[in-house]
């Protein structure tokens, strides 16, 4: 075979890289198995399976602002990864702000107002409160600025679209997993239940789903212990419940609860006696399932929810066809299927650090 000249070799290498890049783009995160809800924004709407495919690229460099409750745990880091990567892929500007925790509703409202004041074309909100942002959303939408509800759920009728799953289903999936192991008539098993910060729409939905799923089983669920999803707050709640209930069989709750519980239980030599479940997944929960320290957790593919929210914002800005209420299909991860899960859809890469801007 004739040897290529250096310029030809360089050109071939460049072409190969370009083709590989194009193939990677074509085989990116989409089409993704999702569920659309009709009528949109309805709590009891009918879910239909769809394959979600985003736009190839935005027609202009739109400026999108994203507001998160906080960036204190790996869950919101995963959503951050999703919005950042999709903004890069579609060629739009993006700024992320975070309020520092679920007690800081006023700060989140101010941050959204600041986003609009500086000229954002669209706003994506992971809401601290289901109702607490309704006034600011009404003001923003009145200025013809699309507002996308991501992850947590907003009750405002003024939002443009929702990229989220049903946290009722997430809570129900965890409760159902437990209830199958403890059917009616079997020995009672006591469960400490830690649904997250009181008042957040996603927490109330998860609580209802979990409680509905365990009805009629042999599980005895203690009164819910509400608290911020910081490790310190959740650790204190877990320790209080363990102290008051030496016969506890399970700790179930947020991903932060599950991560904190594994360390607390090991330090007290209770890890063989008290089992742990979460109702959403993070890298720590994933690792806990891998190592046999956490039984199971539903996955809501938070990375994909972030990606879809950016695509919805661009579609709204460009007047293109928009699925108004959509989320990835939920599935439970446990030791039986963990090796077959596509990690990059449900979790950020280990090397990813909080990122607040795409220019």
Image (tube, rainbow, N blue to C red):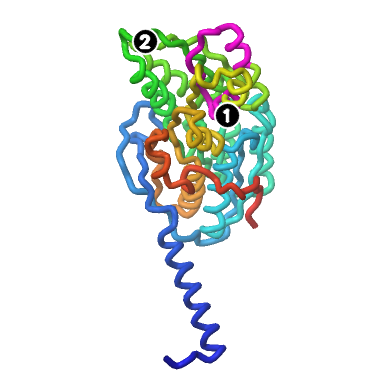
**Residue 264 pos. (x, y %):** 62, 22
Residue 224 belongs to the span the image colors magenta: no
Expressed as whole percent of the image width and height from the top left, the position of residue 14 reads 52, 78
Q: Quadrant of residue 145?
A: top right
- The residue located at (38%, 48%) in the rendering is 32
Task: Say which residue appears at 39% left-offset and 23% top-offset.
Answer: 172
Rendered image: mark on residue 218: 2
Q: Which residue is mark 1?
A: 259
Left or right: 180, with 281 as reference point: left
Camera-nearest residue between 257 and 209:
257
Residue 17 at x, y percent in the picture: 50, 73
Mark 1: secondary structure: helix
Q: Which segment did they paint magenta?
A: 237-261
Q: CA distance from mark 1 to mark 2?
A: 26 Å
The secondary structure that dominates the magenta segment is helix
Label 1 crowd bin: few (<14), some (14–19), many (20+), radius 10 Å:
many
């Amino acid at each position: 075979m004739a040897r290529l000249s250096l310029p030809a070799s360089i050109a071939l290498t460049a072409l190969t890289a370009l083709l590989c890049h194009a193939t990677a783009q074509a085989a990116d995160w989409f089409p993704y198995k999702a569920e659309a809800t009709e009528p949109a924004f309805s709590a009891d709407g009918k879910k239909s399976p769809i394959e979600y495919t985003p736009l190839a690229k935005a027609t202009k460099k739109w400026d999108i602002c994203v507001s998160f409750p906080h960036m204190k745990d790996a869950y919101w880091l995963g959503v951050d990864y999703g919005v950042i990567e999709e903004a890069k892929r579609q060629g739009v500007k993006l700024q992320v702000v975070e309020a520092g925790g679920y007690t800081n509703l006023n700060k989140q409202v101010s941050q959204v107002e600041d986003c609009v004041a500086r000229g954002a074309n669209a706003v994506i909100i992971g809401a601290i409160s289901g109702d607490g942002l309704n006034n600011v959303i009404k003001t923003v939408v009145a200025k013809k600025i699309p507002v996308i509800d991501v992850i947590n759920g907003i009750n405002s009728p003024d939002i443009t679209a929702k990229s989220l799953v049903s946290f009722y289903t997430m809570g129900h999936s965890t409760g159902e997993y437990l209830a199958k192991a403890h059917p009616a008539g079997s020995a009672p098993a006591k469960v400490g239940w830690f649904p997250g910060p009181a008042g957040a729409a996603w927490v109330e939905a998860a609580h209802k789903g979990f409680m509905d799923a365990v009805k009629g089983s042999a599980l005895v669920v203690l009164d819910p212990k509400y608290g911020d999803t910081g490790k310190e707050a959740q650790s204190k709640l877990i320790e209080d419940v363990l102290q008051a209930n030496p016969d506890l069989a399970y700790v179930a709750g947020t991903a932060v609860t599950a991560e904190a519980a594994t360390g607390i239980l090991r330090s007290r030599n209770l890890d063989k006696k008290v089992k742990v479940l979460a109702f959403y997944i993070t890298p720590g929960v994933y690792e806990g399932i891998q190592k046999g320290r956490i039984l199971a957790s539903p996955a809501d593919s938070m990375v994909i929810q972030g990606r879809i929210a950016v695509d919805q914002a661009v579609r709204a800005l460009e007047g293109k066809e928009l699925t108004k209420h959509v989320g990835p299909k939920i599935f439970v991860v446990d030791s039986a299927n963990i090796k077959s899960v596509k990690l990059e859809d449900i979790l950020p890469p280990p090397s990813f650090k909080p990122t607040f801007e795409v220019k």
